[in-house]
Image (cartoon, rainbow, N blue to C red):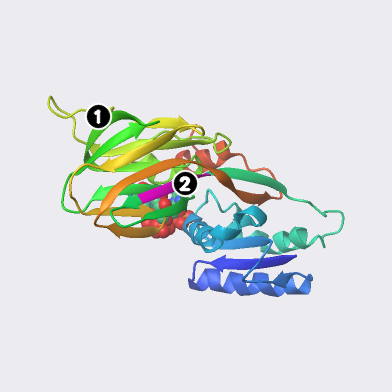
Amino acid sequence: MRYYVQHRDDDVSNRLSNTFQQMASERGMQFDELTPEIVVSIGGDGTMLHAFHRFIDQLDHIAFVGVHTGHLGFYADWQVDELEYLADIMSGTRINETIAPRIVKYPLIDIEIRTDEEIKYYKALNEFTLKGVDGTLVAQIDINNQMFEMFRGDGICVSTPSGSTAYNKSVGGALIHPSIAALQLAEIASINNRVYRTLGSSLILPQHHHCDIYSSKPQRIVLSLDHLTIPMDHLHSIRCSVSSQRISFARYRPYPFWNRVKQAFIGTNVQ
Ligand code: NAP
């Protein structure tokens, strides 16, 4: 099996990456940084975002596995002390435990950005956000080609179901199970008074709907895409929709989404 390791580039992740590569080579796996079958992310959820964007053109034939070196992760579900077990079952060398992984696919967002000069296409695993640089963002939001509302406020966050536990949660969006192919549009500090009005709650679009965000005045805008930042001076509009592509995770054991949510946000000792 061809594999690649993406790590967070801190001392712990560096060391673990070397250890894993040593174990993998002893078990007959081949390190391949260009066309791996499995990408092991060692670090946190942020490391998985880096791994995703590194191999974004090969999503159809790569499966991702996450090992977390800090607190519990949403994309990283193996712990540091399970590294050898992971190498064993990935390579099929553990006696009586040749486990074929279950491939779990999570939805992504397609983002089409139109500026005065060009159209660019992106994908997000967590979300993209749109914010005004010099103050209030003014943007018209259309749903399925119909004007929905005029937004004024700090910004807009459009997230995937697996990204719903990240930035989206901080701005009051709902958590969505990643088996639901949907995108969520959440407001970041919208202005609501007698003059300006927005929905005031987040909304969730199904796979066959799309949403356009038009920059309604000349304004400097900053766009974040997962961990990446894209400054944008001449934005015309952004179309977002649920992507027809998905990210694949190799699951060697069950780890239900709601268990992750509970462990991450509520804790296990709360009665
Ligand atoms: P970062 O600022 O270093 O880390 C942001 C935090 O978000 C980390 O604790 C990270 O977990 C966590 N995270 C990432 N994806 C998650 C997910 N799907 N569910 C729950 N938590 C998640 O930035 P980064 O590591 O480069 O990650 C970029 C992400 O940070 C963005 O996609 C955005 O979602 C998030 N972010 C959140 C806020 C906010 O909540 N106000 C603001 C900016 C960015 P790990 O420690 O495991 O990596």
Left or right of 130? Residue 26 is right
Residue type at tag 2: Asp
Q: Is residue 152 above or below residue 123?
A: above
Q: Residues within 10 Å of mark 1 (few under 14, many from 20)?
A: some
Helix, strand or loop status at disc 2: strand
Question: Which of the two discs, 1 and 2, labels the residue nearer the N terminus?
Answer: 2
Label 1: element kind: loop
Q: Is residue 257 left or right of residue 203?
A: right
**What residue is rendered at 45% in x and 31% in y?**
205
Going 74% across and 59% down the picture, which residue do you hit? 90
Mark 1 is on which residue type?
Thr
Badge 2 is on which residue? 110
Would you name the residue on which mark 1 appears? 198
Q: Which quadrant holds the N terminus?
A: bottom right
* Left or right of 96 on screen, residue 265: left
Q: Which residues are magenta?
A: 108-113
- At horizontal 65% and vertical 57% (from top left) the residue drawn is 62
Q: Identify which residue, 160 or 58, lies in the foreground.
A: 58
Q: Position of residue 219 (x, y in %)?
A: 19, 51
Q: Any magenta on residue 8?
A: no
From the top left corner, tell me how far across and down residue 84 is, in percent. Answer: 71, 64
* Residue 23, visible in the rendered structure: no
